[in-house]
Image (spheres, rainbow, N blue to C red):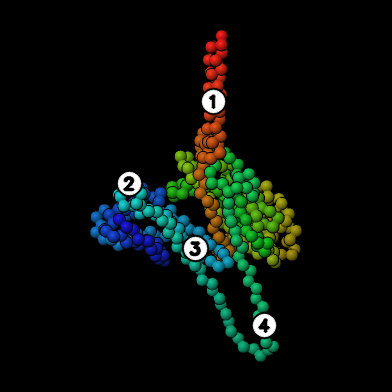
Amino acid sequence: LNLGVPEVDCMEDRVKVLFHTEKPFTGRIFVKGMVDKSQCVNSFDTNSKSNVQFEIANGECNMRRSRKLGPEHKGVEQSIAIIISFHNTFITKIDRAYRCTCFYMEADKVVTNRFDVSMLPTTDLIDTARMPLCTYTVRRGSLNGAVVTYASVGEQVFHVWHCESDMFSMLVHSCFVDDGNGKEKKPLIDEYGCAIEPTIVPDITYNDANNLAFSEINIFKFADKVTTYFQCAVSTCMKSEGMCVGKTPPRCGNNIQKREEKIDETYDRHRFARHVNKPINKSEQIVDDQNTMDLSTDKIIVLDLDEERPGKESFTASKLMVEVCFFFQKFLTIIVLGGFIC
């Protein structure tokens, strides 16, 4: 069956996928990893049409949602992977997988008020600070090490967040890990940027410019699951006029005393320092949807303690086995020859 290129219709409350086949489509369509959930699967075994459509409500079936905050694109991105299968039970070579992405762009709103006053003409001098490009990666060995795609339980890695700008500070918050199938999801960092379970993910360390942050973590995984996905929200604020003082880095654990001293130093100039023991007021948070983006790491495949990572380790083990066998064979040959000589 010839499958044309599917079309994606990004509707206000749902995502619609449409495609056309030469003959009536009698297979099924489902969201990757969600085949056991009825709302994420649609069977067409009694279908008599060649035009097929599949709809998913926004936020359902492990649809990934992330806020984008960039120089040219600002809005919300919805993404989901679907499988178009021509068989109702098995996956075959003619089946197709597609990642459907919808980007809902946020319109910039400009409010103006016109008034005419007889005065000297003025010239507007406007400079727009472009939002920084921020990334979230998991690296091996150091902050600049190789990006991790395979890892073993207990292996030490660095979670690194970086915004390429000296004008902005950032706060990493609202982090979670999931298994990619929507069945397991665990919060790691709260909305204030503090670790929820420091024994699993310690508090985040920031550099002096507050545009680089990292956390040194021992790899972990969900029981009987292979993949892990990490996602965090990153909020930015401009350093000028003290907009970030007292907001980032967060005052968590061992950082409390240092943060309190830093805030006290700038209190007279900025007039909004707060005692560390005072409850956080939501109006004082850095978290602002207008300046917040969602960042995700690449998929990480985590092996159990008794498994080997594909690659160099497996090759080394195989090479060692060959060398041992070769040595043993030579040893037997020497014994046999020695017997003939005797």
Judging from the image, what secondary structure is the residue with disc 4 in?
loop
- Residue located beneath label 3 in the image: 76
Q: Which callout, 3 or 1, points at the residue further toward the start of the chain?
A: 3
Crowding at label 4, few (<14), some or many (≥20) Cα neighbours within 10 Å? few
Which of the two discs, 4 and 2, sits closer to the camera? Answer: 2
Chain-order first, disc 1 or disc 2: 2
The image quadrant of residue 289 is bottom right
Circle 2 crowding by C-alpha within 10 Å: few under 14, some 14–19, many from 20: few
Q: Residue at x 58, y 54 (%)?
A: 136
Q: Which residue is mark 1?
A: 326
What label does residue 123 carry, if any?
4
The answer to whether any part of residue 282 appears in the image is no
At horizontal 30% and vertical 50% (from top left) the residue drawn is 87
Question: Nearer the observer, disc 3 or disc 1?
Answer: 1
Position of the C terminus, as image quadrant, is top right
Q: Quadrant of the N terminus?
A: bottom left
Q: Which residue is mark 2?
A: 90
Q: Looking at the picture, how far across and down is residue 19, in whole percent?
A: 34, 61
Near-viewer residue (6 or 233): 6
Mark 3: few, some, or many residues within 10 Å (few <14, many ≥20)?
some
Tell me which amino acid carries mark 2: Phe
